[in-house]
Amino acid sequence: MTNNPVIDLFDDPNKKFVKICAPMVRYSRLQFRKLVRMYECDLCFTPMIMADCYVKSAKARAHEFQTDTDDRPLIVQFGANNSSDFVNASNLIIPYCDGVDLNCGCPQRWALNEGYGAQLLKNPEIIKDCVRQLRNHLPTNKTISVKLRLLDDHRQSVDLCQQIEATGVSFITVHGRTALQKNEPIDQECLKLINESVSVPVILNGDIKSLSDAITMQEYTGCRGMMSARGILHNPGLFAGYQNTPLSAVQDWLNIKHTNFLWFHHHLVFMCERLLPKTARKTFNQLRTASDVVSFLEDQLHISNVLPSNRILGKELGGTSGAYYENIAVEDTVSSQPEDIVDSIINLFD
């Protein structure tokens, strides 16, 4: 055992692989992290936080990051295009988490134009400078990592990961598609090659929609971590082996204290996709108040003992932290099919 809880997960001989909840815009917040931890998720990431805004704005810090004593182990992901912002933001947040991660995978146009996310793959010196500069400040019981996408060919992808490893990262997460790919199958062959070419743990991200997917991909690639985004959003019980969202997860979600109706409802839309018949689902997805949502679930799914404060949630989002969120449309209602929501935001998940 080390004094680093994240590395201890990777070193645990009783774990075939580490089960990880991906950084997802709006969705991998504290409440959802609480829920998936109840269902055998080992490690959670926050949504990406813009490092410059986090440093400059107390309002942004309060809005973008919430945690509690049970929310561990936890990795905070930052979007940054220079080492100064990355180091300064990391120094502010590191007492409240177990490690920080640099987003080098977001393919959104605004991010590429501003030098964030996948644009950093074209500027590897910035990635290496961010890691080196923070490594000099980071306590030994905290991790530093990078989450990236594949480059155009296997050799380039391996070379980049080896360069990043040499800067002193604790682990690397690889989304198995290039920045231009969307729904194509992930490149497991490249992920396998990367895993065999570096000595730090590699986390596989992409196409994990069930526990059996994770097991199969781990056995083929050898990656020591399996990260799910869309799969765990639809089914928080994924890593516990459930094929669909267990009814107990809906009950647990209604007993976690929430602060915003939109996030509270959107998660339920995903979770209830296969728990409700089509006509009921369409009605449920268009409900506009927390009271109506809770009453509907009590009637349809026989849910009981709901936390009283979740019946009166409002829709106010509070402050936002800058350009990253200017491109996220916040709607009062959601579409009649959860897939429509996923299609509109999935690239934000990296």
Image: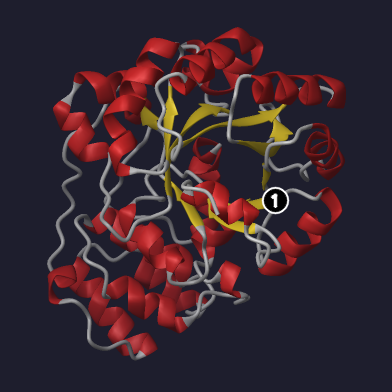
Residue at image location 35% in from the left, 50% down from the top? 29
The location of residue 177, given as percent across then percent down, is 72, 35
Residue at image location 74% in from the left, 36% down from the top? 199
Displayed quadrant of residue 155: top right
Which color scheme does this rendered protein use? secondary structure
The location of residue 227, given as percent across then percent down, is 61, 51
Q: Nearer the viewer, residue 221 or 287?
A: 221
The location of residue 294, given as percent across then percent down, is 25, 76
Displayed quadrant of residue 32: bottom left
Q: Is residue 199 visible?
A: yes
- Is residue 184 shown left or right of residue 299? right
Q: Is residue 323 visible?
A: no
The location of residue 55, given as percent across then percent down, is 25, 21
Q: Nearer the viewer, residue 334 or 350?
A: 350
Q: Nearer the viewer, residue 282 or 218?
A: 218
Displayed quadrant of residue 53: top left
Q: Residues within 10 Å of mark 1 (few under 14, many from 20)?
A: many
Badge 1 amino acid: Arg
Q: Is residue 245 above or below residue 105?
A: below
Q: The C terminus lies in which quarter of the figure? A: top right
Q: According to the image, label 1 marks what residue?
A: 224
Q: Is residue 26 above or below residue 266?
A: above
Q: Is residue 282 above or below residue 29?
A: below
Q: The N terminus lies in which quarter of the figure? A: bottom right
Residue at image location 34% in from the left, 76% down from the top? 252
Label 1, secondary structure: give it.
loop
Residue at image location 56% in from the left, 47% down from the top? 7
- Is residue 151 shown left or right of residue 144? right
- Is residue 261 shown left or right of residue 100? left
The count of marks equals 1
Q: Nearer the viewer, residue 210 or 136?
A: 136
